[in-house]
Image: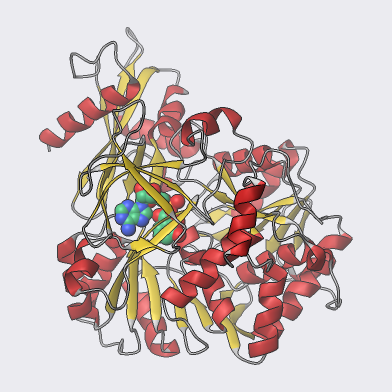
Amino acid sequence: INTIAAGVVPYPPEVAERYRAAGYWTGQTFPALLDAAVAAHGPRTAVVGTGPSGPERWSYGELDARARGLAAGLAEIGIAPGDRVVVWLPNVPEYLETIFALFRLGALPVFALPAHRASEIRYFVEHAEATAIVTVGRHDRFDHAAAAAGIAAEVPSVRHVVVAAERDAELPDRALTLAALRRTPPDRLPGDDVDAGSVAFLQLSGGTTGLPKLIPRTHDDYLYSVRASAEICGLGPGTVYLAALPAAHNFTMSSPGLLGVVHAGGTSVLAPSPDADTCFGLIEAERVTLAAVVPPLAAAWVQAAGSTSRDLTSLTTLQVGGAKCAAELARRIPVALGARLQQVFGMAEGLVNYTRDDDPDDVVAETQGRPISPDDEIRVVDPADPDEREVPPGEVGALLTRGPYTIRGYYRAEEHNATAFTADGFYRTGDLVRITERGDIVVTGRVKEQINRGGEKIAAEEVENHLLAHPDVVDAAIVGVPDDFLGERTHAYVIPVPGREAPRPAALRRFVRERGVAAYKVPDTVEVVDAFPVTGVGKTSRRALRAALAARATENQ
Ligand code: J2J
């Protein structure tokens, strides 16, 4: 079976053929990935974590039995191959059970982050025409199940809300518990016959425009990146991986992440929270060997390591990615944590770069590594040149990429795709980079209209649109300003409707939060102004305005 094709930009057939011939695309599907793990490592521990019913520890055999049983229950309520299902779960073992159940069904997870709130989830549900939402009850002082039920009541495509909760948990109308859907695991399920060239799931983009984008990834392309990542990072059955960041983030999932661990037959430990206290406790208790974090977390862990009584000696590698890791921080990591650093520069659209184990220390500290695949094509071009000519070797330019696991288009986004991709299929990453003589990538900045708040991506326009929804606001501009801890935080300039009382900064922040957006998108600071306090950009682009405002806000720090 082929899952979905409408709204997906396929790889050109001759390119797909080349990737198959080169051995990158092997025809392996997600169900086959789990089959292989069960066959080779059945009794080994696949996942450790705390779910709604308490601590869990499942072998590969148990994970598979649960996934099959849940798949059967989901099929019974009408979830079918090709259906999109929004997975809105924190780091609980049921996350893995759910995604493999959906893969076993040939249904497509749409990965939401636990921090997302109703306005984002509603958009994913509508854009993907999802038929179900899988979530938890109360988590992080927010009732996910109630929010999901509210969306289900408004969006006609959604027929079910499934909640990872105990069987007797109190649930909103129309919601079912995941436990109530568990059946006797059947031998065969529709996903066993899925075509590896078809789309396996929809991943989220960091976003640069008013609306987030969905990223369609195929079994073939994604699992190539997972297997190759597992090899680069030296994963094996002895690997114990700590998922400190949200499980659904592309980094945690695939670089080499939870799926790389399944491929290698190792153990994944799901951290309920990324703080040093929780994670150091888990590292000690489970003898964690590998963990992945964003730079602000790495800094917090380095700090905490000075006074911890926990035994961290099992940790051999700390991966840092999602945002630029300062060289000073990079150099402190091995000293403070007794672990090797690996820098990871990746994106949910595809391309992932790693520093390698045998790289010199300076390369590991100062570069963001090099691509996974010999067939990752990299072009560094002059961002101001309409013909996008390459800059001379070693100079800074905008990074374009194409390759065996980089998408050719966002899901149902024809108009945006026309600017996000070149005519010959390169993805415009929006990152500014230079390539060292050795061929390593150094990220130096970006040209995209996105703020990277400690690894969490914020599209300026999306937040501006929320501010513009306020009746007393006529215009708004969001800019990123340097922050010691996060690398960058957000500052909003807001112009009130003339003649009316200007809304207060705190009220505007509350307004954005109450529209139901992830907390990390709420502007860190708001400044109410009569006019944007920069001159000379009046008639130019929004981008030029933001750049000038950001420069000004930074100067005023
Ligand atoms: C500078 N900028 C970085 C880095 C990502 C592995 C790791 C990270 C992501 C990810 C991912 C950076 N230094 N080391 O998907 O599989 C910024 C760039 C990039 C954007 C992508 C993975 N690592 N970035 O962060 O889709 O701007 O993926 O284009 O969330 O994060 O963001 P995202």
Q: Position of residue 436 (x, y in %)?
A: 22, 57
On screen, 488 above or below 180? above
Residue in the image at 32% along x and 48% along y? 453
Q: Quadrant of residue 111?
A: bottom right
Q: Nearer the viewer, residue 170 or 287?
A: 287
Between residues 192 and 434, which one lies in front from this camera angle? 434
* Direction from residue 459 to residue 129 in the image, left or right: right
In front: 476, or 239? 239
Residue 287 rendering spot, x and y as whole percentages: 41, 89
Q: What residue is drawn where x is 33% and y is 16%?
A: 496
**Looking at the image, can residue 503 be seen?**
no
- Decide if residue 557 is on the left or right side of residue 161: left
Q: Position of residue 435 (x, y in %)?
A: 26, 53
Against 501, residue 22 (above or below) is: below
Quadrant assignment for ligand 1 = bottom left
Which residue is farthest bottom? 43
What colour scheme was applied to this rendering of the protein? Answer: secondary structure
Looking at the image, which residue is at 67% across and 48% down?
13
Examine the rendered structure and indicate whether residue 326 appears above or below residue 389: below
Q: Is residue 299 above or below residue 153?
A: below
Q: Is residue 212 left or right of residue 474?
A: right
Instruction: Count every numbered label the image shows and give the total.
Output: 0
**Residue 293 appears in view:** yes
Quarter of the image where the C terminus is located? top left
The residue closer to the viewer here, 370 or 145, is 370
Residue 502 pos. (x, y %): 31, 18
Q: Quadrant of the N terminus?
A: bottom right
